[in-house]
Image: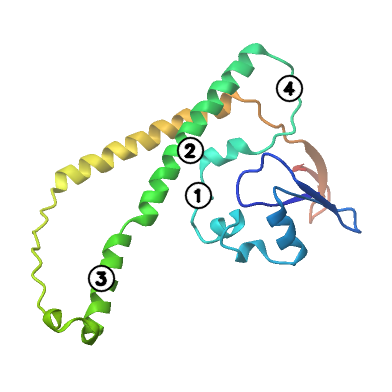
Amino acid sequence: MVELLTSHFIKHFLTFTVRNDAKAFRFCKSKCHKNFKMKRNPRKLAWTKSFRRAHNKEMTVDSTLTFAQRRNVPVRYNRDLIQTTLKAMGRVSEIRQRRERAFYKARMRGNKQRQREEDRKLVEENQHLLPPSERFAKEEVEQEDMEVDVQKVKDKVAARRKELEAEESELSELEEELPKKKTKTKKMMKRKVGGGVEAMDVDE
């Protein structure tokens, strides 16, 4: 069993620790190793991956993330299959990057307006700290009426939905082309109440 404490995607393991119960821990750098020896919880440190996932700062539920999971399925060598897999890897990474950018923009939406309101509130509460010439001055802010075109918004939403449907269909096609893990089933016998035996399938 291997547990990883990392702040980014791991490429090289610098330190390695084995505990008394034969559990192995690998770390990407000495910073992770030192924090592990200090018995710090990775979900409470702001620079770790587990903290960012726990606080909704990164995508955790998406169909593109399932492709990165390890599949322990032996597959006979096939050149066409390898070429299809390499193409699928590139395409999936492009889709994931696009969705991560959209996720980041949605998460950061409204931050500038919120910060501006906090700054205005701070200035209003601390007018006595300003110079006399600027104290209690009325702000003249030109507010333009934003006319929202409903039809344009609907067209944008429809176009975005079409893009998402196309990406999902493409991902489903890639999943069908890649080899899938077969689930083993075993038959168990179930006793009926009135007497007799009934067969049923159970997945391992």
Secondary element type, mark 3? helix
Which mark, by number, is residue 96? 2
Give the percent coordinates (x, y) of residue 134: 14, 79
Which mark, by number, is residue 117? 3
> What distance separates the C-alpha of mark 2 from that of mark 4?
26 Å
Residue visible at 11% across and 73% down? 139
**Mark earlier in primary sequence (2, 4):** 4
Position of 41 relative to 84 (above/below) = below
**Mark earlier in primary sequence (3, 2):** 2
Position of 16 relative to 35 (above/below) = above
Q: Mark 1 or 4, which is nearer the eye?
A: 1
Secondary element type, mark 1? loop
The residue wearing badge 1 is 59
Secondary element type, mark 2? helix
Residue visible at 75% across and 33% down? 72
**Mark earlier in primary sequence (1, 4):** 1
State which quadrant residue 44 falls in: bottom right
